[in-house]
Amino acid sequence: MKRLSVKIAPVSTNNDIQRVADLAKEIWTQHFTAIIGASQVNYMLTNFQSPTAIKSQINDGAEYYLTQVENEWVGYIGLIPDFEQNKMMLSKFYVKNTSQGKGVGHSMLAFIEKKCSLEKFSSIWLTVNKFNVDTITWYKHHGFSIIEKIKKDIGAGFFMDDYLMEKVI
């Protein structure tokens, strides 16, 4: 099998931010509608993955990266460093359906792990919806463990019903 050329680039311009928002809309609509419903997907896209929300997160210290394969933008990463806890939050990790199962996610995770190692973080943590079974399985396969269950009110009557998962670096 031909090895894909995966490029991961920092989000630094308004065009990059719009590209992330566009990818979020495509990926979230395809993947999460069956898990959490269209109303919650739309609410979360508007409040957490719009260009305004992404720009605000970056201004607050989040780092976003775009993933490109063969000249096509196929995914994105959002990281939030916690220097006090010496941990990195993997806030966003999304790949288009058409690029899944081809090693793209593995390349993205390797990029994150290298970054965390270089920056001397002790672990990477994330939250994942309890009903997102394939994703939970993927994270477990890549060394993450479920640490706890979290249910968080995100407004407008919606909740995030997640597992907190962590991988020690």
Image (cartoon, rainbow, N blue to C red):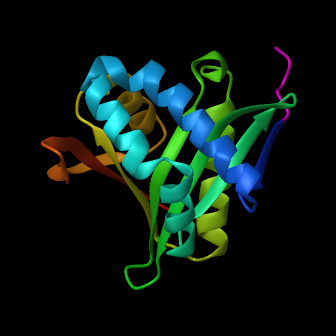
Outermost residue on the bottom side: it is: 84
* Image spot of residue 15 (x, y percent): 75, 50
**Residue 74 at x, y percent in the picture:** 69, 31
- Which residue sits at x=57%, y=67%? 58
Residue 102 in the image: x percent, y percent? 68, 21
- Does the magenta run of residues contain 4? yes
Residue 149 can be seen, yes or no: no
Indicate left or right for 162 with 51 as reference: left
Judge left or right: residue 68 versus residue 26: right
Q: Is residue 116 left or right of residue 126?
A: right
Tell me: residue 115, above or below residue 31: below
Q: Quadrant of residue 118?
A: bottom right
First to last magenta residue range: 1-5
Q: Identify the residue shown where x is 86% and y is 18%.
A: 2
The part of the image, by quadrant, that contains residue 101 is: top right
Residue 16 seen from this side: yes
Q: Nearer the viewer, residue 110 or 67?
A: 67
The percent position of residue 166, horizontal first and vertical second, equals: 36, 54
Q: Is residue 153 magenta?
A: no
